Image (cartoon, grey):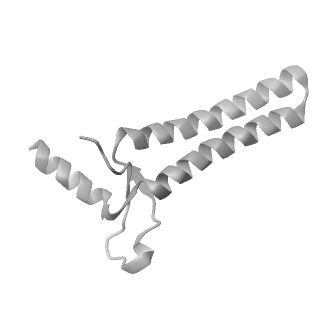
């Protein structure tokens, strides 16, 4: 099953209109989980590389720049994926109900 969407919105019960969106997203496909894992790897890798560069070479600007580049790349990728690959109509609850119905 090729998923058109990678994320579904976590819509709170009882909220109407535009307010019901923006409460968070949950991954519904492996691509969504991969984007989240990539963000975490970018943040941890940037922090570790900054630490090692600062400890071994004492060049703070290089460590900070490398961390900032990795953080912006990871965060930007995550924001792009959520903005373009989120289902605007169905919530995570609908996807869970569909999976239970198919699974038995």
Q: Is residue 25 left or right of residue 45?
A: left
Image point (13%, 42%), residue name = 103
Count of numbered labels shown in the rendering = 0
Q: Nearer the viewer, residue 3 or 101?
A: 3
Q: Residue furthest right?
A: 58
Image point (81%, 38%), residue name = 64
Q: Is residue 101 left or right of residue 86?
A: left
Which quarter shows the C terminus?
top left
Q: Nearer the viewer, residue 76 or 41?
A: 76
Q: Quadrant of residue 59?
A: top right
87 lies above or below 54:
below
Q: Quadrant of residue 14?
A: bottom left
Q: Position of residue 8 (x, y in %)?
A: 36, 56
Q: Position of residue 34 (x, y in %)?
A: 45, 37
Q: Position of residue 101 (x, y in %)?
A: 12, 50
Q: Is residue 84 left or right of residue 77?
A: left
Which quarter shows the N terminus?
top left
12 lies above or below 5:
below
Q: Residue furthest left?
A: 104
Q: Position of residue 86 (x, y in %)?
A: 40, 56
Q: Residue furthest top?
A: 56
Image point (82%, 25%), residue name = 53
């Amino acid at each position: 099953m090729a998923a058109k969407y990678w994320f579904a919105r976590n819509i709170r019960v009882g909220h109407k209109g535009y307010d019901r969106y923006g409460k968070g997203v949950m991954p519904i496909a492996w691509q969504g989980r991969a984007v989240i894992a990539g963000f975490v790897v970018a943040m941890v890798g940037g922090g570790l590389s900054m630490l090692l560069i600062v400890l071994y070479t004492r060049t703070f600007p290089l460590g900070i720049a490398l961390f900032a580049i990795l953080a912006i790349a990871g965060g930007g990728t995550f924001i792009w994926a959520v903005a373009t690959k989120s289902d605007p109509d169905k919530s995570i609850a609908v996807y869970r109900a569909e999976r239970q119905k198919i699974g038995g």
